[in-house]
Image: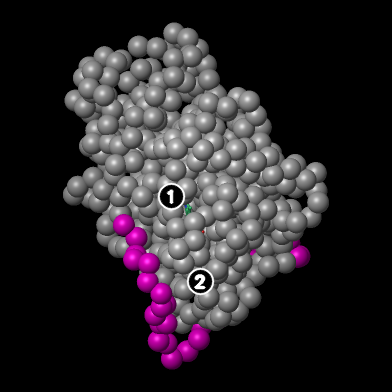
Amino acid sequence: MQQTSTKRTNKPEPVKRAHVRPIPQLGGGVPFLGQALGFQTNPLDVLERGWKKHGDVFGFKMAGADFVLFAGPEAHDAYFRAAEDHLSAKDVYQFTIPIFGKGVAYDAPRSIMDEQLKFLLPALGTGRLRKYVELMQEEIIAYTDEWGDQGEIDLARATNDITVNVAARCLLGREIRESFYDGFADLYHDLQLGINTIGFFAPKLPTPSHIKRDRARKKVVKLIGGILADRRKSGRVEDDFMQTLMEAKYKSGRGLTDDEISGILLTVLFGGQHTSATLAAWVGVELLQHKHHLPALHDELDSLYGEGPDFTTPMSLASLKASDRLHRVVMECERMHPPLIMLVRKVMKPFEFDGFVVPEGKMAMVAPALSHRLPTVFKDPHRFDPDRFAKPREEHTKANLTLIGFGGGKHRCVGMGFAYLQLKAIWSTFLKRFDFELASPAPAPDYGNWVTGPQQPCRVRYTRK
Ligand code: HEM
């Protein structure tokens, strides 16, 4: 169903052009800050203005840095195929090092980071995913059991709580899930404070939130270290990411240190939790504004799980994979509301596309939020229309890399399959058990956050079936 992105190959293919074309510059910013103020309020507006005026490649200034935006499938292809020593993600993600730790992910040489990400593959294989679906459903059922027969919730808060619980259970391990309310949630919150604008430019600056972040990381490593020691001592084996990492070895034959295991678990938690929570909230916001899609979704759920609010046939990996209509709704929400609206790389040596040459030292960007709304790719792109992905339309297959909510190329998200399962597990359970309606006006995107979710309040009324 989901379109696959380009393979992880190394060499960009330079476009041969007789003349270098000057990169058009987007005007209208203010001195030094450039487009920063516009980006703070509505980056999509700024980018759409640039695209309408200049097309698939244009430059702009933001907070003293020069950015060049690449839009459209051809540009994505060149961008995502560029090697790390050409367009560097590592240089941009330095702010994650105090959270993930030394020698982990973006602090490690790319070959080591690749090995670390490969350690996760067994944890994302079919056998494990089958188990995670059971755990996901247990968590979602337990969470919604706490709701009354009727009431109001903040949807973004609810999807955040559920995805934290699921991540703790499947990724971090049963022990952390069980000790959750004894402090891990607070530590996670303090770590999240470390992702902020100052941290992006000066991750080591001792601001109050950075001090909290550093203290929290020390405590998390201690907590995880205690669990690792306990598992080793008791010989207990669990079905989770932590176990996979405990058994993994680098090509050199060396096992992972406790600090590395903690760092990789935090990488995965930060990569997957908040992003999944916001996309799950957007699914609700869109569906509740377009309720005419609900009857067909209910038919699909009835055919998979039996009629009524209970699951006569239990949810499984197979049933979630067979949820075609729900899958298309999630894809449409990924298209309209990609949680990561911009992906940035630092240009390490001149990067050429379609005759434009971006010099070393500049920032190169693709913006899923803009690219997913190009009328040249998606018909009527501002309209919520999940059927654009159904046969015979399949708008996303007209070119490679049209849908890039999970990135592309060598940095493409390793957790996409897990994320899709979780999103479908949440909404299958929600829709089966409850009727919903929006209780506040449909929220606009909250661009003040690193991950773009719906603005608060995002109130929803529910009635148990
Ligand atoms: C809706 C949920 C999610 C979204 C929208 C999302 C989006 C993305 C995007 C756009 C990238 C590429 C970043 C770049 O190119 O700079 C990425 C990378 C990554 N994601 Fe996800 N992600 C999600 C869920 C997950 C989950 C559940 C996991 C783990 C189980 C995960 C782990 C990662 C990791 C480790 C990377 C780095 C890959 C690399 O650099 O090679 N993500 N994700």
Q: Residue at x 23, y 36 (%)?
A: 318
Question: Dot 1, crowdedness within 10 Å: few (<14), some or many (≥20)?
Answer: few
Local SS, label 1: helix
Q: Which mark is residue 247?
A: 1
What's the residue type where badge 1 is placed? Glu
Asked whether the residues under the numbered discs 1 and 2 touch, taking CB atoms below 8 Å apart as contact, a structural biologist would say: no
Local SS, label 2: loop
Asked whether residue 31 is drawn in magenta, I would say yes
Residue 249 location in percent, x, y?
45, 58
Rendered-image quadrant of the C terminus: top left
Asked whether residue 154 is drawn in magenta, I would say no
Determine which residue is flagged by label 2. Answer: 84
How is the model colour-coded? one colour
- Res. 49 in view: no
Question: Image check: 371 left or right of 230?
Answer: left
User: Relative to residue 14, is residue 429 depicted above or below?
Assistant: above
Extreme residue toward the top, this view = 149
- Report which quarter residue 230 is drawn in: top right
- Report which quarter residue 211 is drawn in: top right
Magenta span of residues: 4-33
Residue 126 location in percent, x, y?
29, 44
Viewer-proximal residue among 369 and 110: 110
Q: Residue at x 54, y 32 (%)?
A: 176
Q: Residue at x 66, y 36 (%)?
A: 187
Q: Residue at x 48, y 80 (%)?
A: 352
Main secondary-structure element of the magenta-colored stretch: loop
